[in-house]
Every structure is written in structure tokens, then in C-alpha cells.
Amino acid sequence: MATKVFTTDLKVGMFIADLDRPWVDTPFLLQGFLVEDQEQVAALRSHCEYVMVDRARSVGDEYVSAPPTPTRTVPPIGARQGPMTRAAVAAATPSKDLPAVAPPQRHAVPRGLPAREGRLVKLEDISRRSSGRFDAGFPSPEAGAPGEGLIGRVMTGFRGLFSQRRENLSGTGSFTTLPEVVAETAQEFEARAALLPPGLEVQTYANQTTVEEEAPRAREVVAQASDLLDKLMGDIKLGQSFEVERVEEIVDDMVESIVRNPQALMWVARLREQDIAAYGHGLQVAVYLTSFGRHLGFPRAQLSSLAQVGLLLDVGKIRLPRALLDKQGRLTDEEFETAKTHVDLGLSILGEAPGFDTEILRGIEQHHERMNGSGYPRALVGNDIGVFGRMAGIVDCFAALTNHRPYASAVSSYEALRNLTAWGGEFFHEALVQQFVSSVGVFPVGSLIELSTGEVAVVVEHSKVRRLKPRVLVVTAPDKTPATFPTMVDLLYEPKMGGTAPAFIKRGLAPGAYGLNLADFYLA
């Protein structure tokens, strides 16, 4: 059980489970650590007003009994016209408590796990027939997924998702039924339109292909984009010119694939994460960011710009010391300041290549800015941050949390989304966070999940009717041993899968849970 503790009350021996701000905005790169000396206490006080302390993992008799939980408040979006102190922020508006965040789960590989022999399964080769499909029709709106064992609670209605305080974070909460969505309402359309810059006509995109049909083209796009990034970074190291036209060419292919069906490219980029040796983070950000823009209704020209923002937002890191990028543990103040210069370094690199649109450069410049003015490099506040910068900040943080890094383990996609919504309002634009959750789903494509049957699966495609009942690829048996023949299952049709009750999603899993490498089951 995590308890909120003001940093003025911190002591050596406390285990820090979460901060009051995004981890990626601080020198504390390890998500979850034991306070070992006063230097760490001082560093936490300089960056945070409060933290979440896991007393079960803390040391010392004085940490057995939890003190009363203090109240924390954050202001709404758009309420501030200039920088505010943390004390002013705390006194400004109604409360919105940051929930405790459990550390990433580490699952041991079951004993007797057989050695895998490279069973490669291509997505388009798997039958679309739903395993265990007993009911021919759609379930009724009242037939929600059973809630036993799910992490937290999802409130009815997607726009209100995560907006209330989460409870039972250990995995004993439940999901309530989401309403069936047949068509977008006028209110939903207006909510999207309000987030686009004035003068842009809102687009509504419909999938033109299935995931299986789009997967081969998505694989080609990912491979080409990965090769391009490697070449561009090599050219930068050698001082050669930057090929703007080549970037635009690859981006156009990416946008076309996402317009046809964004879930295919998200699937491929997510499963190829471990195979993309360098700059895979930028590639994933580009895919999610462009898909996010498609969901909001940006025209294709702006989708192309968003893709370029995602691909190139971290290009400045090529000029940072490699030892700094790979360091494990907390950065020193000097190292953290050096790391933050990657934004200006990137702008300098891109500025040497004429042809980049000002909107793209602005989005790259602002992807580490935060709504309350705590970001960098310009400490911009609220509406001073452009929509591209706000969107890029959300997606960059999501991709960082859900991928393994040299200094931190990945968390599940669900956990990352829960963090983002908790930080919405103070650090990220709250309405945009809600729309991002809507665009990727509670369990995004490529997420590893555990079913109520005990089997592990990966989310392949979302249902527009019931977002908690996606189509999944089952990759293990109930005892977590790898499946000899991965099976596609559509949870929308409430398959029994050998049990007496319909199978449902029990919880989200972090990448690599149970020793699973998704590349063993799918070759992109």
C-alpha cells in the first residue's frame, strides 16, 4: 500500500514508489527506489512536493505505521496565465489526488518451461475464426465483462475513463460495462474539433482494411523507417547533410498506412520494439502520434507533420555522451541539465537542413514542456504550448514508460495510461490525455494481457462496439507455457475457451512478463 508523503517529511529508508510528476521529467530514472542517504532526500525535495511511499518495501521500524494521508490539489487546464509556485497550485483548485502506482510486476518463468524453437506466426496467416465462439450475435449492452481480478476500475463512458480515483490497485478491483458505441455523437465530434487549431476542417476516418490485410504494408513501412533513421543518424555523426525529402517520403507511406488502419502499424511497431536497434523510440512515438492525430481528425498534411515530429524529437541525443544515455540510477544535477540540452541540440541539427516546416520544429521544441511551466527548455505554461507539443509530450511519455530502457523496466500499457491520466491537468493537457486514451484503447494494440482463463494474449485489434472486448492472439496455455499454435480469439463474442463462463481480460501485463518475447510468435 503506497502512502502520500510530503518531501519535507522524507527519511532515509523509505521506498519511493511514485513521484508527484512524470518520472521522465526528473533525474530519478529508476521507477521505484530505496532512499539511501540525505543527498537523495535533498534531490527529491528539489524536484517534488510529495511522493508515494511503499511502506511494505521501506526499511526501519518507524515506517511500519502509515501517517495520515495529506491532501493534494491541482489546478484545471487553462486556469493559469503565468508560472505558479507549487504552494499556489496546491491552493488554487479542487482536489484531484494522484493515485498510488504499483511497481512493474516481475514474473518468473514457470518451472519446466520448454525451450522455444522459433515458432514464427504471421498475423495475416492466422484464421479470423474466433476460437470458442458460441454466440452468433453481439452481446447485449448490459452484458459487461466480469470484473474479478482487474486492475483498478474503468468508469462507464470512455471520456470519463480513469477520471475518478482508482482503488484496489493490487488487482482486486473491477471494470464496469462500457456502453456500445455505434456512431460518434455530436458532443464527441465537438470535443475533437475543440482541440484542433482554428481553421482546420475536422476529418473523420474509417478503416479501409483489416489488420491482417494492412500488416504486410505496415511491416514494410516500419522496416523502411528503421533503416532511414539508422542512416540519418549515421549521416549526422559524419557531419553529412540531412535528407529532408527522404524523411517526407517515408512519412507519407506511414500516414497512408495509418489512414487505412492505424492498428496494424501500432501492432508491428510495438512487436518490433526489441528488434529496432537504435531510435526505435522515435519510430514508436511517430506511429502513436500520427494515430492520435488521425483520431482527433487532423487532415493528412498535419498527420505528415506529426509523424515527422515523432521520428525526430530525440535526434539531438545523437550528440550526447553515450555513457549519459545508458546510465543506470539517478543522474546528477549536472548530468540532468546536460540531458535536457538534447532538445536544443536537435533543433540545431534540423536547422542545418532547410525545408522543415515551422510547425514541425515547434512540436519538437515543445515535447518536454508541461502545462504548469515545469518543463523544458523554455518553461512554457498552458496555452503557450502548441497542440503538437502537447500531443508529443503525452505520446513520448507513454512510449518511454512502456518500453524497456537501460535504467528502468517497462510497465504495462494500462499502467502507463493510468499514470498519464493522473498527471493530466497539471503536467499534460487533460482533454488531450482523455482523447489519447480513447485513440489507443484501455489495452492498446500490442499490449500483453492475462485472460480470466489464465492464458496470456496480445491485443491485436479493438472492437468499436466494446472497447474492453478486443480481438487477441492467445500465446500461452493457462499454465503460462508458450502455445504451440497461437490462436486468434475475438472477446466480443464472449468465448468460453474451455471454461463455463465467457473469457475476459483479467489484467494488463508488462512487456516480457512470464519470460515471453512476442517476436517468438510473430515475425514482422
Image (spheres, grey):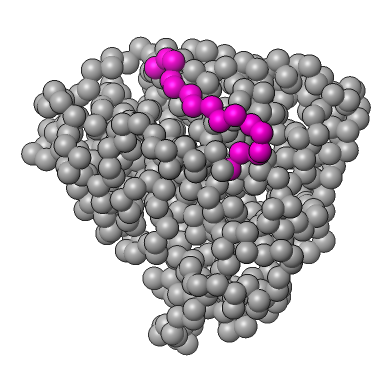
> Does residue 210 sit above or below 508 in this rendering?
above
Quadrant in the picture for the N terminus: bottom left
The quadrant holding residue 194 is top right
Rendering quarter of residue 362: top right
List x then y, in percent, for residue 4: 49, 75
Query: Is 444 part of what is drawn in magenta?
Result: no
In the rendered image, which quarter is residue 211 located in?
top left
- Estimate the x, y position of residue 288 in percent, counting from the top left: 56, 34
Picture residue at 81% right of the left edge, 39% below the top: 346
> Is residue 171 shown to the viewer in this render?
yes
Q: Is residue 466 above or below residue 385?
A: above
| Residue at the spot 34% in from the left edge and 64% down from the top edge | 167
Q: Residue at x 68, y 56 (%)?
A: 382
Tell me, yes or no, whether the highlighted magenta stretch contains residue 204. yes
Residue 44 is situated, as x and y percent measured from the top left of the image, at 66, 72
In this picture, which residue range is highlighted in magenta? 195-210
